[in-house]
Amino acid sequence: MAVCLLMGTPVATAKKPEVWLEVTSPHFRVVSNGNEKEARKVADQFERIRSAFKKALPDLRVDPNAPIIVLAAKDEKSFANLEPSSWQQKGQLQRTGLFLRGPEKNYVLLHVNAEGENPYQVVYHEYTHLLVNEGVQVLPLWLDEGLAEFYGNTEIESKDVLLGRPSADHILLLRENKLLPLSTLFAVDHSSPYYNEEHKGSIFYAESWALTHYLLLSAPQEGKNPLLDFFKLLGQNVGAESAATQSFGDLNQLQDNLDKYIHESSYKYVVLKGSTEVDEANFKVRELSPSESEAVRGDFLAYNDRYTDARTFLQDALHEDPKNAQAAESLGFLEFRQDHPAEAKKWFTQAVNLNSQSYLAHYYFAVMSMQESAAGPDSAQIESSLRAAIKINPNFAPAYDALESFYAIHGQRLDEARMLGLRAISLEPGNVRYRLNVANVFLRMEQPENAAKVAKLALSMAKTIEESSAAHMVLDSAQKYQEYLDSVKKQEAEIAAAQQQSNLPTNSDQEGTPANPNAGNGKEGDATPPLLRHRDVDVAQTGGTVDSGNHPPPARGQRTARDGTITSVKCSPPTLMDLSLETPSGTLQLHSMNYFSVIYSALNYTPTQELHPCRQIQGMKARISFYEIKGQPYSGEMIAVQLRK
């Protein structure tokens, strides 16, 4: 009877966790819920396409500074659990791969069993994006996708590599539909329906492939290469539309040539002789623990802006293994992305304690501490953590950039700060923010001409409204600062000329106001009043603030920072700024003799328009770093203004 009862009663069983494997090859890390053969194949294909790129394009850097992590989903359900939420909306273009490029790591998500004429097309496509975005500063979207599609249609054989094979799907689609006008194609950006909607997106990808294929393989004649010319012009900061006209000629004629090209009966492609060099004996395979696999997926989802799902995975990972440093680090990153500084710092501190060799934990701990107070008691620890991150990973550009900003805010070691910024740029040439930070250091060093050069280049590289606004702000400050220095130089030259003509002593001989040239000679007349020297300021102009060139500047006290609301801003000629900051402990009166040398930035958001400090920051929240000043009408000398939401 008992046996019968037992057999007739359902028994609850724990659901067996899904197995995820990790395949580590010399240059890639593949994490997959497929079988070992499939995971190895993905790693093999990435290594082979890397080898093919290295042979075909020897000048291209095929190994980015940040690690490449490939999430290979075995089926559509697994892929959907990780893809962006926006892709799941009705009518969206169906994709089988995603590339997420970040300063800390590069992620590739792919569906390994997706249908299509080339099952590894998505692998090659996403890897092309990775390399192109790593090595090229400015690239229009049509060409970015066109190159990815061109190299995505690569076939790797035992003895040869076939680059740029024609895409039968693209050709058929373009023959059955009207081509987009090239002006429309060239104007497509990431927000355009032609990039996101299913039918329009398919046309955009296909035509981008066809135009790139034509320009690479059929348009070059008599030693000319229009696409190479286009790249060169972009590198010289020529606008994309102007560069296209100069490189490709008449666009109407190009449109006709492209239409004829699509209807041709055969297409060229590149045959790269010699097999790709991949030794699978160097591959390492292991099964990830549930905690490890959850941490990897949670981290990817945090990068992919699926915060709720990311938090679930990461909390489950720590429940499985409280010592999982990756999960703690990723939770810190998640809180950082959601602007929860206290929680973020807590998790990064835990990650450092769990694994002192986590350069990301060191970096983010320092960044969060800087947001609290770059000039407070944690100052030495901030510097130490950033140097630790650089030592652990010398190719991690954000750590160099952060240490540069740290020194700039302090107004110290500016030469080293500039070199740190240049190192960050060399590691990530396409990062606009790194270049603007270097421009700010040049302003801090009172070198506006160099700052303007850097800001102009950054402006030419800007890909978003936010980047363009930030670049305009820095460029405007540099140009106005240079105008001021030029006016001072002109005034000094006029003073010298007037003194020479009047036989007056020079400033090196006598301080103070030059004597009236007519005094004591028995003649009456009005002497030309002396021009203002660099530091001579009229009390009436400044509303009571005086800093004469005949007196030493006030002694600086310790560096500090305060949070509050900017209640008033007054700028006076030539470059003075007086600012009131309302803080919880009272109102601070802050001052700058040269507001162009103050570093302006946004702490936890990116302004959507250009901001002019003298006119548009009143009423905003900010953290202001300054030197404490004694015996003056103001409390401190401003170093940096960090605007906040």
Image (cartoon, rainbow, N blue to C red):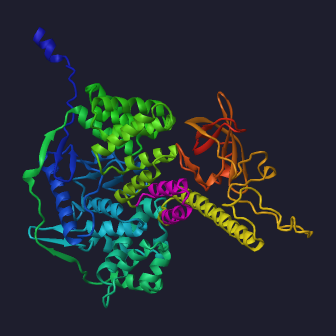
Please say if 363 is above or below 230: above
Q: Give the range drawn in magenta.
A: 430-459
Residue pictured at 49% horizontal, 48% vertical? 408
Q: Which image quarter holds the C terminus?
A: top right
Percent x, y of residue 529? 82, 64
Per the image, is 449 magenta? yes
Q: Quadrant of residue 194?
A: bottom left
- Quadrant the N terminus occupies: top left
Would you say 634 lies left or right of 324 here?
Answer: right
Residue 341 shows in this picture = yes
Residue 495 sits above or below residue 94 on the image = below
Q: In this view, does 356 lie above or below 527?
A: above
- In the rendered image, the vertical position of residue 473 relative to residue 394, given as above or below: below
Q: Position of residue 94 (x, y in %)?
A: 35, 56
Front residue of 182/103: it is: 103
User: Magenta segment: does it hold 63?
Assistant: no
Quick check: 112 left or right of 87?
left
